Image (cartoon, helix red, strand yellow):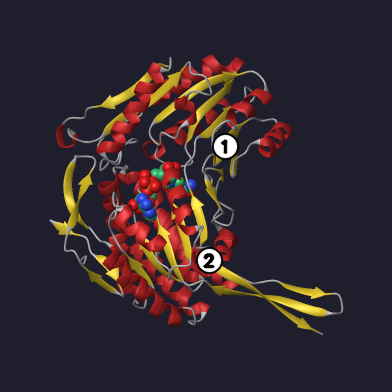
């Protein structure tokens, strides 16, 4: 069986323990590869390599760093098919989606920051006649990048690209549920000639690998994407150590539909924003609010289209909904479908799905649509992170703003209306880091990305990430 290796100091190496964890293919429910069960010893080695490499990499001209990152991006594009299939097998997502979204976005992340760093400038301030100030922006040091399983290579590269472009070195930990494409990336880094120690990838469990990286005194900066509970834990360790921290956490995003919307567009995009990637995207709109006079018509059209979605083998081209990432996650999502009914909701469609043939033991759920729930019940307040949405009617703008803002989260919100004034007014009042009007997940990598409240701290994307991954230093010269 294929054994995944750690990538430390430029070499593909086994874990010190020589122990491995099982890696499942969620579409068939079987172990297909082995993940290093790394621990503190591997982390120490990786941090030491990154610390040594920082002395050199932070001095390498930006153009040279850019060239190497561009080369890695080219290699990702060259291996597009292999990476898309690997992502699909590891995560359960349809291979078509991986090929269209995950893998192209991974190379785009690298290209974006490889070029952004060439244009990144700092400020200067002329203080009347008395002095001139300028800002130096220096790389911070050994950076910890921890990523989740839902968009594995996409989010992994979204972190390492700006960190490396800015001149930091990295110790990264991909999710233990989806380590495979990060492993393939480490081979591409070797091929691209990335100097040893600049990027180190340590595989394994969160508490045995992620936490020791966070706790390491030689790691001054942490970029984390994952669940809010893990984010709290990381913040509680990093806070007293005064580490620079960026946290991209969970969401419970509202999707608000006014009766003056472009109806067909609102329905078809809402199918997409509810169930893409099996609903396992932090930006999915899991609470749909529909203006009362459109409610019946919307529910009928929406449920009709949901029933037509093909749940199936992720490796087949026609599949729209693949497998959930693990048996444990499938069970968690099913328990929320159960809870929704206990809370008085009506399940209009969806639930556990048993496939036959190759995928008979896979972790599948048919997209679920639930109505009849109040906005403040647990189903509508807690992140489910699966193919489950609720639909609720509303009558007034103030009312829906209150519902939308009522959760502990504040990542994204989607709004459907042809009334421009209302769109601006709502965008101003919704407590979310990202607002999409008449669209969803239309991304421009230059924009600030992140959430309010328990959806996170800080912003990624564009200059925000390069500012985060550099330390500003003010120099003041008296004239
Ligand atoms: P998770 O928090 O369980 O794990 C994320 C990563 O943290 C994994 O690599 C894991 O091994 C590691 N980890 C676990 N415990 C740790 C610890 N004590 N110290 C350090 N690292 C530790 O999250 P998940 O289940 O992999 O991902 C799903 C969550 O991620 C959802 O809540 C989703 O909303 C969120 N997410 C947020 C964004 C965003 O941009 N805001 C994007 C994608 C996913």
Q: Splitting the image into 4 quarters, where does residue 400 fall?
A: top right
Up the image or down, 104 lies above or below 405; here it is below
Q: Residue at x 22, y 45 (%)?
A: 25
Q: Label for residue 255?
A: none
Residue situated in front as seen by the camera: 287 or 316:
287
The answer to whether one can see residue 231 in this image is: yes
The answer to whether one can see residue 347 in this image is: no
Relative image position of residue 370 (x, y in whole percent): 43, 21
Q: How many marks?
A: 2
The answer to which of marks 2 and 1 sits earlier in the sequence is 1
**Residue matched to label 2:** 469
Q: Residue at x 22, y 27 (%)?
A: 354
Up the image or down, 282 lies above or below 11; here it is above
Disc 2 under 8 Å from ligand 1? The reply is: no
Relative image position of residue 191 (x, y in whole percent): 30, 73
Q: Quadrant of the N terminus?
A: bottom left
Q: Residue at x 53, y 66 (%)?
A: 469
Up the image or down, 155 lies above or below 280; here it is below
Numbered disc in front, either 2 or 1: 2
Q: Secondary structure at mark 1?
A: strand
Residue situated in front as seen by the camera: 223 or 12:
223
**Residue matched to label 1:** 413
Relative image position of residue 67 (x, y in whole percent): 45, 75
Disc 1 under 8 Å from ligand 1? The reply is: no
Return the residue found at the far right.
Answer: 129
């Amino acid at each position: 069986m294929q054994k995944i290796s750690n990538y430390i100091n430029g070499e593909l190496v086994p874990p010190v323990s020589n122990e491995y964890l099982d890696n499942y293919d969620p579409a068939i429910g079987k172990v297909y590869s082995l993940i290093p069960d790394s621990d503190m010893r591997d982390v120490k080695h990786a941090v030491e390599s990154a610390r040594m490499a920082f002395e050199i990499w932070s001095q390498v001209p930006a153009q040279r760093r850019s060239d190497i990152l561009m080369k890695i991006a080219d290699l990702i594009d060259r291996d597009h098919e292999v990476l898309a299939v690997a992502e699909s097998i590891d995560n359960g997502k349809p291979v078509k989606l991986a090929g269209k979204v995950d893998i192209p976005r991974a190379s785009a992340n690298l290209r974006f920051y490889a070029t952004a760093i060439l244009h990144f400038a700092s400020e200067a301030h002329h203080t009347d006649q008395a002095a001139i100030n300028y800002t130096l922006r220096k790389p911070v040091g050994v950076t910890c990048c921890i990523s989740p399983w839902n968009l594995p290579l996409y989010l992994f590269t979204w972190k390492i690209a700006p960190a490396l472009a800015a001149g930091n070195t990295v110790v990264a930990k991909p999710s233990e549920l989806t380590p495979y494409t990060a492993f393939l990336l480490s081979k591409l880094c070797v091929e691209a000639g990335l100097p040893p120690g600049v990027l180190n990838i340590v595989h394994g469990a969160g508490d045995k690998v992620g936490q020791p990286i966070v706790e390491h005194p030689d790691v001054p900066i942490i970029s984390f994407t994952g669940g809010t509970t893990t984010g709290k834990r990381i913040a509680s360790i990093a806070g007293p150590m005064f580490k620079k921290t960026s946290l991209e956490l969970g969401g419970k995003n509202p999707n608000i539909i006014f009766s003056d919307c472009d109806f067909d567009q609102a329905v078809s995009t809402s199918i997409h924003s509810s169930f893409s990637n099996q609903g396992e995207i932090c930006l999915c709109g899991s609470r749909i609010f529909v203006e009362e006079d459109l409610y019946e018509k919307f529910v009928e059209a929406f449920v009709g289209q949901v029933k037509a979605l093909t749940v199936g083998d992720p490796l087949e081209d026609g599949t729209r909904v693949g497998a959930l990432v693990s048996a444990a996650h499938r069970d968690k999502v099913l328990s929320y479908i159960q809870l929704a009914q206990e809370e008085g909701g009506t399940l209009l469609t969806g639930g556990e799905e048993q496939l036959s043939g190759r995928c008979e033991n896979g972790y599948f759920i048919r997209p679920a649509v639930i109505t009849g729930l109040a906005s403040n019940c647990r189903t509508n307040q807690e992140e489910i992170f699966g193919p489950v949405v609720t639909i609720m009617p509303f009558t007034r703008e103030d009312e829906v703003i209150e519902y939308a803002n009522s959760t502990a989260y504040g990542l994204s919100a989607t709004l459907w209306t042809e009334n421009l004034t209302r769109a601006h007014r709502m965008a101003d009042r919704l407590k979310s880091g990202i607002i999409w009007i008449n669209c969803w997940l239309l991304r421009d990598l230059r924009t600030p990305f992140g959430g309010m409240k328990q959806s996170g701290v800080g912003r990624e994307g564009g200059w925000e990430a390069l500012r985060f991954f550099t330390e500003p230093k003010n120099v003041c010269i008296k004239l």
